[in-house]
């Protein structure tokens, strides 16, 4: 049981493929963090959100999506896990925003977090694609608002809910960004050490040839 729990929280390692291992590690930390924050959100739900039952169902849905993505990543289906996570979260998030006031909903900040995550996990093209689709969805909401279309308020956003949403957005953006920057720093340091060792070897060879 203990070993199973350890395996659940440990990112897979792919020998000979540092980039794949890095993405798996970032994905693993991201999904674990999101599940922890969702569990915390469920705990404070009755006190922070005006409609706790609807919010609890929404939290449960996102938790299931993140859990599936986490398991897929552990089993080595990293690319599938990441695309599943990005696409499912984007679609459900857009529906949620449309059902909760549209352009006036603070949850729009999640589009920024999702764009950053897509870039770190899937690359530049994915980041650009998510950014463009997010912008398009936001423009549609803006047009609906300007033309007088009244959006439903299934999930009214209180000041407490806004605080939780902003905090959550910052957390899920900071974690993968920090891990990626640390990995890049480690790679640069490793490359520097290898260059220094190579220079020492070349210098030793030149000295031996001169003798």
Image: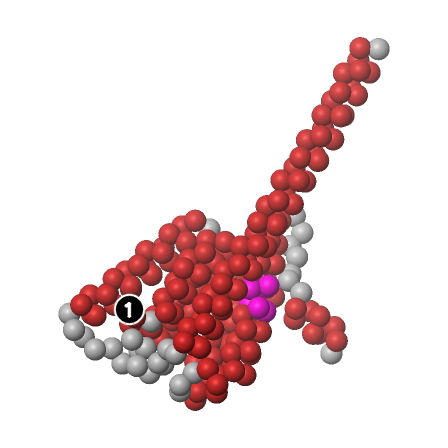
Answer above or below: position of 207 versus 197: above
Q: Which residue is mark 1?
A: 103
Q: Residue 110 placed where, x, y %?
A: 41, 65
Q: Nearer the viewer, residue 110 or 30?
A: 110
Q: Residue 171 placed where, x, y %?
A: 52, 64
Q: Is residue 139 shown to the viewer in this render?
A: yes
Instruction: Verify whether residue 162 appears in magenta.
Output: no
Helix, strand or loop under label 1: helix
Image quadrant holding the N terminus, namely: bottom right
Per the rendered image, the range of residues in magenta is 28-33
Q: Quadrant of residue 194?
A: top right
Q: Residue 88 placed where, x, y %?
A: 42, 69
Answer above or below: position of 21 versus 1: above
Q: Residue at x 53, y 59 (%)?
A: 174
Q: Is residue 91 shown to the viewer in this render?
A: no
Which residue appears farthest toward the left when viewing the image? 147
Which residue appears farthest toward the right when viewing the image? 211
Q: Is residue 75 left or right of residue 124?
A: right
């Amino acid at each position: 049981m203990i070993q199973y729990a350890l395996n659940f929280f440990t990112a897979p390692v792919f020998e000979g493929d540092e980039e794949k291992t890095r993405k798996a590690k970032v994905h693993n930390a991201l999904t674990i963090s999101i599940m922890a924050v969702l569990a915390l959100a469920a705990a404070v739900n009755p006190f922070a959100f005006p409609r706790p039952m609807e919010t609890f169902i929404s939290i449960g849905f996102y938790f299931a999506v993140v859990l599936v993505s986490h398991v897929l990543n552990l089993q080595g289906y990293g690319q599938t896990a990441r695309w599943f996570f990005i696409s499912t979260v984007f679609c459900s998030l857009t529906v949620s925003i449309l059902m909760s006031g549209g352009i006036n909903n603070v949850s729009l900040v999640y589009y920024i977090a999702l764009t950053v995550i897509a870039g770190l996990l899937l690359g530049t093209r994915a980041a650009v694609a998510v950014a463009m689709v997010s912008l398009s969805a936001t423009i549609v909401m803006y047009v609906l608002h300007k033309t007088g279309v009244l959006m439903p308020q299934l999930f009214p956003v209180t000041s407490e809910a806004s605080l939780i949403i902003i905090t959550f957005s910052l957390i899920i953006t900071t974690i993968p960004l920090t891990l990626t920057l640390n990995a890049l720093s480690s790679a640069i340091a490793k490359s520097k050490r290898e260059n220094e060792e190579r220079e020492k070897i070349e210098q030793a060879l030149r000295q031996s040839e001169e003798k």
